[in-house]
Amino acid sequence: ILERSSSSDYEGFALNLQPHACQVLHELNLLEQVCSVSWSPVDQRYYTFDGRLVAASARGLLAGKDFPQVSIHRGLLLAILERAVCERLGRKSFRRGFESKSYCQTGSKVVLTVLN
């Protein structure tokens, strides 16, 4: 995996991971770790400009889903994923400071050009 950033100081914002994404994290044995540093919205609400509730619906487990919906800071999620990749595939499988410039596919072969 090539990461553009040369630093592990991830900047960013919160992401909402829907239940199907949390199912994938569960299959990778990462959901418990993600849930320990995230929060789960209980519902989603829509209001008019003057504050009247228009609609509301439950989210994640409260909506009867098999997996939660979670909100997590992008940097925390990327740190968890990076750590898992390095533990499972080796440190050399995750490289920093590379930018994808272009790619070319010919048949079943793909050539990726990167800048360092």
Image (cartoon, rainbow, N blue to C red):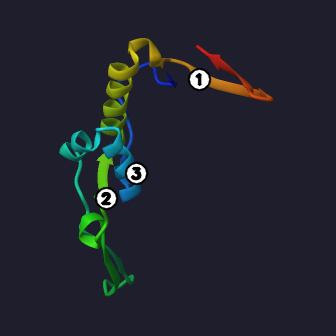
Nearer to me, 72 or 6 = 72
Residue at the spot 23% in from the left edge and 39% down from the top edge = 33
Q: Earlier in the sequence, mark 2 or mark 3?
A: 3
User: Which residue position is annotated with label 2?
Assistant: 69
Q: Earlier in the sequence, mark 2 or mark 1?
A: 2
Amino acid type, callout 2: Gln
Question: Taking 94 as reference, is 107 left or right?
Answer: right
**Pointer 1 with pointer 3, Cβ within 8 A:** no
Residue 21 numbered mark, or none: 3
Nearer to me, 89 or 104 = 89
Q: Nearer the viewer, mark 2 or mark 1?
A: 2
Residue at the spot 30% in from the left edge and 61% down from the top edge = 66
**Quarter of the figure that contains the C terminus:** top right
Residue 99 numbered mark, or none: 1
20 above or below 106? below
Q: Residue 79's quadrant in the figure?
A: top left
- Give the secondary structure at mark 1: strand
- Give the secondary structure at mark 3: helix
Q: Nearer the viewer, mark 1 or mark 3?
A: 3
Residue at the spot 22% in from the left edge and 47% down from the top edge = 35
The image shows residue 93 at horizontal and vertical percentages of 46, 17
